[in-house]
Image: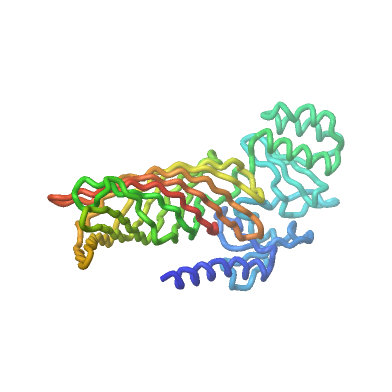
Amino acid sequence: MRARLILLLLLILFNPFRIHAQNPNTKDGYIILLSGQFQYGFVQLDPSLNVYTECLFSVTIDKPFVKYTTDKIQGYGVIDGIQYVMKEIPEGTTTQKYFLKKEIDDNLARLYTYQNNRFFVENNGFEELKQSNYRALLLETMKNCKRVASTINKMDFSPADMRKLIDKYLDCSNLSTSTTTPFKRFHFDVLVGGELNSSTFQLKSYLLNSTVIPLIDKTKVGAGANMHIMSRELRRIAMVIGVYYYQQSFYAVANSTAIDHTTIDKINLDYKEILVPVGLQYAFFKNERMLMPYLRASIAIPVTLGTTVSWESEKEYSTTVYFEQYELPQNLKQSLQPTVTAGAVVNLIDKVRSIVELSYISGSGELLDTSKTLSVNSSRWVFMLGIRF
C-alpha cells in the first residue's frame, strides 16, 4: 500500500517537471473566442514581440499548438495572470489589430500597453496616451485612487514612470489581477506526512491497574488531500475541505505487583481513521511570492473503520505464568476534532507549488459495551508535505 502511494506521488510530481522541461513558457491559459466565450487549455508565451500579433494555444499539453491571430480570437491569457486583448490602434496612416497587454482593469480604470512604449486607456472611450494629454487622461481614469494624483502630476511620459504608476495604482486599489481575467477558484493539495500522537486511555472498569495510561503509537504515516474554494472578492480567505487517512495502531501497557505475583496488562487498539476537516484559511499574502504562509482553523469529522481492540494479561508467579487474551468491544466512537494548521506554499520551480503544513489536532473517543467503558483522549501534531494543483 505504501509503495503504491509513493509511486503515485512520484508520477504526480514528475508530470509538472515534464511539462516544464518541454517548454518553460507553457502556461495554464485560455483564448477568448470571437463569440466572447473562453476556451481553456495551454498557451505558450513567446518572449518575442509575437505576443502582440499571435497566440500559440492547445487544448491539451500533448497536442500540437495552433497559432491564433487577431482575426481569429478576441484575446488570450494566463490563468491567474496576464491577459492580452485584441484592440485596433493607429499604425501610421491606417489602423491595425494587435493584442494589447491589459495592465489595469477595475470598475473605473482600464489601461493597456503595446510593446511597453505605447499606452492606452479605456474609460468612456478608447484613447492612446500622448505627451499632450496623458496627465489629464490618467487623472480622469484613475480618480478612484486619490494617492496616485500627485504621482501623475510629477511623472514624465516614459515607460519607467508609467510602470511605477501602474504598480502604485494596483497597490492602491488592492488589485492583483484583472477583474475580467479568469482565475483558479479551486485549488487541490495532495499531501503525505507523519504524526506525533499523544493519546491516553482513561479506564472506568477493571481491565488495567492504572486509571490513566499513555498509548504508544506504532504508526506515523498519513496521507490527505484538500480542496480550496475561493472568490475574487476575498482572495485571502478560502474555504477548505479535506480528506485525510491514517492507519492507526496503538498499544498500552500497565504493570502491577502483588505479594505472590506480578501482572502485565496490555491493550492493543487498531483502526483505520478518515478525517474530513472543514474550515477557513487565511493567506497572509494575496499576490504570488516565493513563500506564501497561511493559517487555517477547521473542525474535523472523524470516520472510524475496522476497529480491533484486544486485551492481554500475563500473571507471573514464582513457578507459573498465566496468560489471558480476548477481544474488547469494537465500536469506537470519536468526537469532532478541532484542528489548527499553519502552512506555506513554496514556489521554487514554475508549475510546481510545494506545500508544507503543521497541524495540531485534539479529540476524544469511547469504546462501549454493557459492562466496560474505555475512553481515549488524543492530541497530536501532524507534519505534511505535498504539492498544489
Q: Is residue 202 left or right of residue 73?
A: left
| Viewer-proximal residue among 152 and 377 | 377
Pick the front one: 296 or 316? 316
Q: Residue at x 71, y 32 (%)?
A: 142
* Whole-percent x, y for residue 338 in the image: 39, 42
With 171 as the anchor, is 190 left or right in this view?
Answer: left
The location of residue 29, given as percent across then percent down, is: 61, 58
Q: Residue at x 25, y 60 (%)?
A: 309
Q: How many marks?
A: 0
Q: Position of residue 58 (x, y in %)?
A: 60, 67
Q: Quadrant of the N terminus?
A: bottom left
Colouring: rainbow
Name the residue nearer the viewer: 255 or 26.
255
Horizontally, is 169 left or right of 264 in the view? right
Q: Residue furthest left?
A: 370
Q: In the picture, residue 176 is in which quadrant?
A: top right
* Residue 92 visible within the image: yes
Q: Is residue 235 visible?
A: no
Query: Who is closer to the viewer here, 59 or 377?
Result: 377
Horizontal and vertical percent position of residue 25: 69, 63
Quarter holding the C terminus is bottom right
